[in-house]
Structures are given as C-alpha cells and as structure tokens.
Amino acid sequence: MNSSQQSKPPTTTTLGAGKAPSRPQTTPAQKQPPPQNKLFQLNKQIILTARKLETGPLENYVHMATLIHKLNLLLLEFDSIKQLRNILRIIYSKPLLNSLLDFSMNADQFAHFGIRLIELLTLEFHKEIAKSEVLQIIFGLLRTNDYETIVQCLSFVKVLLQTALAEQGVTQAITPGTPALIKVGDILNKKLLVLMMKTVLKQPEIEHVSILIDIVNLVLTDKDQRVLILDAILKEEDPATTLIDDEAGPYNYRRMLRNIEGQVEIRSIKALHKKLTRQLKEVEMWAKSKGK
C-alpha cells in the first residue's frame, strides 16, 4: 500500500458518516480547594509568619518589612471580621507586639508597615496596645514628611479611639454607670492632638484632612476632652495669615478648618467638604457656648 493510500488518524474536526461531530478534547477542570481547606492554609501561613516575627529583629529591617507586609496582606484575605478576629487572638503575643514596636521605631521608610499591623491587632487588643509605647512612637513618626507614614499614624489613632469608644458603649449598655477602662484622654493627650493638627496644617493632603476630621469627631464625643479642640493653638498670630482669613489672634483649629474649607480640592470632594463644614459648625457652636 502506498503511503498516499495509508489512512490518516482522525482529527477532532472529522465528520463520520451519520455521526455527530466529535467534540474537541479538553483538559479536566482543576478542582478548587474546599473553603475550609483554604482557610486552614491561610491561618497556617499567618501563624508561621507571626512566629518568625516574634523572635525580634531578624537579619535586617528590610527582611522584617517583607514579613510584616506579607502578614498585612494575608490578614486582608478573610471573608469576615469574625475570622479576622479569631486569627488575631491566635497570633497576638507580647513578644510580637514588642518586635513590631521596635521595628516601627527604627525602620524609617518601612515604619508604616509595622503601624498598620499594630492597627489590625488593635481590633482585639486595644487595651494592651494603648498601654504600650506605640503612642510615643506615633508622636515621633508624625514629625516625618513621609506621606504614607503620616496617613498610617493618623489611621492608627483613629482606629484605637473607635475601638475604645465602641467597647465603652457596649459596656455602658450592659452595665450602666460602669467606668470606661480606656478613655479618650488615655489615648489622646493635648500634645499628640496638637501635633496631629499641626502636621495636617503643614501637609493638608486630602487623606490627612479626612482622617483628622474623623479623629476630632471622636474627641468631641467626650465632654471632658472637647476643650482640647478649642484650646489647641497651632501657631501664633501671623500678620500674613491674618490678612488672608481676616481674623486676629492665635491660629486655632477653627481657623484651620475655615482655610481648608475654601480649598478647591476639598470642595471638589462633596462628601469630605460636607463632613468638614458640619464639624466646623459644631466646633463654632461649642466655642460660642463656652465664650471662646
């Protein structure tokens, strides 16, 4: 038989007499791991990474930054806040917190990675974290000019306040009259509040302004701490500034809000502008009632 007469192997597109077209061969779909197995693997990665960080400074802070950033990303993969809280209870330890504090204090441009992870731990351990050295570290980091570091520091203070006030609200609902374990004044003293305001005044980025307004709103809920907002002096009278806002005297938070409120970038974001003007009215009403 000639080679030309040899039958060729059928292809997937060949039609047989009276038969339906043959289907192209496909590779079987890979099975997705069951959700429970995926959760187990995620928890395992997080626990192993956290245990490495517990040992303290590793080869160098760049290595630690890599592990902390990895842990931050892994913690964002949970489908529910309940799952996140569960793993936070497993990985938290005093050595881990101390390691993160040391990193945040010494890692320069990577410091915001450490503060971010401490912020996540705050969801379950705000009392322990509030009593640590973290607020002193925040005080130092706010003096940097790094955008991400400032955003993260402001965000941390906001979350710490929110968590403390939320627990206080739950406690009061269950047992009225019970004193709060952590008060606003235990977290935010006048020096830190003024430093945050001065930092945002110096760099009035949109995200900085937005978070600071949220922090001040939380402070205003505490009657004993409202006076901090009214008494905060951000800078002494500046003749050049006085010509701009037509108001003499020390530059306080109200004047800062008035000046920021007029910025085009702020007005272009309706939700932020609305939040700012609402707070400005509240602060002015409170100041008027106090004769300030």
Image (tube, grey):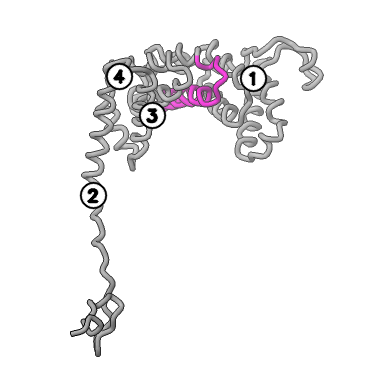
Residue 172 seen in render: no
Which residue occupies the foreground of this view, 149 or 119?
149
The residue under the point 42% across, 13% down is 106
Disc 3 or 1, which lies upstream in sequence?
A: 3
Which residue occupies the foreground of this view, 45 or 60?
60
Residue pointed to by mark 1? 202
Which residue occupies the foreground of this view, 244 or 153?
153
Q: Is residue 42 above or below residue 126?
A: below
Q: Secondary structure at mark 1?
A: helix
Q: Is residue 46 left or right of residue 284?
A: left
- Nearest-to-viewer mark from 3 and 4: 3
Give the amino acid at mark 3: His
Residue pointed to by mark 2? 33
Give the amino acid at mark 1: Lys
Residue pointed to by mark 4? 96
Disc 1 or 2, which lies upstream in sequence?
A: 2
